[in-house]
Amino acid sequence: MARLAIDGGTPVRDTLLPYGRHSIDEADIAAVVSVLQSDWLTTGPKVAEFEEVWAARVGALHAVSVNSGTAALHAAAYAAGIGPGDEVIVTPMTFAATANCVLYQGGKPVFADVRPDTLNIDPAAAAAAVTPRTRAIIAVDLAGQPADLDELRTVAERHDLVLIEDAAHALGATYKGQPVGAISHLTTFSTHPVKHVTTGEGGIVTTDDPEMAKRMRWFRNHGITTDHRQRAAEGGWFYEMEGLGYNYRLPDINCALGLSQLRKFDGWLARRRAIADLYQEAFSSTPEIRTPKVLAMNHPAWHLYVIQLVLERLRVGRPEVFAALRAEGIGVNVHYIPVYYHPYYRALGYERGLCPVAERAYAQTITLPVFPTMSSGDISDVVVAVEKVISAYRA
Ligand SMILES: *Cc1c(COP(=O)(O)O)cnc(C)c1O
């Protein structure tokens, strides 16, 4: 058996393959340069154009851009009317921002456990967490696979809650044939470089609800009800601030980059799906690994490819497998540390044991690299390295 790199053997690769990577080409650069040479650097024509193209891409009536996926969640929490004393049911298997947006609004995140197969929020657990103070549910389409949106909508409608979907991983994913973006009341996306398309930093919220869209447009601009362009066009100076908003505006420079990126997105999505298919096939006969379970109604966008180790079949735990894969040159990662494990949440009184399924999953997940420009050599390096490490640590 080949000696592991971590034990002094030759690594599968001598450069680290990252788990995700953006792609920027000459067309992207030209799009940004042309905005830099124009009259508008921040809120100008590219913002509206980016929002229109994004809304059309996901089949929603409205899209409101902001300057991060975190700001998108905050705007959605605001539009949903979350305020002090309100409870919001959230999945723990996510990046902290998903739950933090509830805290920003003075609300209380209530963590509901995930399904063991998809690691998406379990609709039964969400239903069981509803109290008279519950205001909303925030689901995440983990790794790009839609959550159980119909079941969650049913729970939301029964209790008059707003369903917010954090689709930071899921641009292009479909649920029962429909793209994510207009299935939940509010759907948020991130355009951070590691996500499907990038604007540098950025985020966007989509909805079919015109009132919520309007509130989010104020919210991203200090709570002011007219934008700079409108005022310039009207030649006026008067404006009113109607709510407490922020400066969450996404500049034209970034929107131009996003528009250029979106033109390439269909090809990138197809490539992610092809890479995931290759992994599914390659690891299907490795009993030490559980490959991601895809539900029949879902067509994931594969932002991440997350395997679960079958620890009973291994001599070591996830930390050793992780370190060994890194030593082989594979930039593995872990998604996610349950949100309430973070010291800030512990200090708020959240304790371990809240969501046993998520906690067990956390101890055994490893994220393998997936990004559109991975070569077939990169993909086979991942497969070879995983097989090498698993064989060495087989119980
Ligand atoms: C990336 C991400 C966010 C935050 O997006 P930013 O653009 O980095 O602020 C929120 N939720 C999830 C699930 C994410 O993956």
Image (cartoon, grey):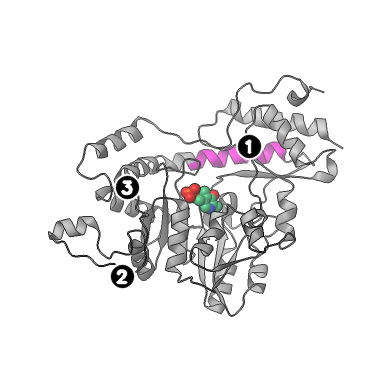
Residue 173 screen position, x and y as percent: 51, 52
* Location of mark 1 (residue): 278
Q: Determine crowd level at label 1: few under 14, some 14-19, many 20+ residues with C-alpha closer than 10 A.
A: some
Q: CA distance from mark 1 to mark 3?
A: 38 Å
Magenta region, residue range: 269-283
Q: Quadrant of residue 265?
A: top left
Q: Determine crowd level at label 3: few under 14, some 14-19, many 20+ residues with C-alpha closer than 10 A.
A: many
Residue 184 screen position, x and y as percent: 49, 65
Q: Is residue 92 left or right of residue 253?
A: right
Q: Is residue 169 visible?
A: no
Residues at badges 2 and 1 in contact (C-beta under 8 Å)? no
Disc 2 versus disc 1: nearer the observer: 2
Disc 3 versus disc 2: nearer the observer: 2
What label sits on residue 242 in the rendered view?
2
**Residue under the point 42% across and 58% down:** 205
**Residue at disc 2, secondary structure:** loop
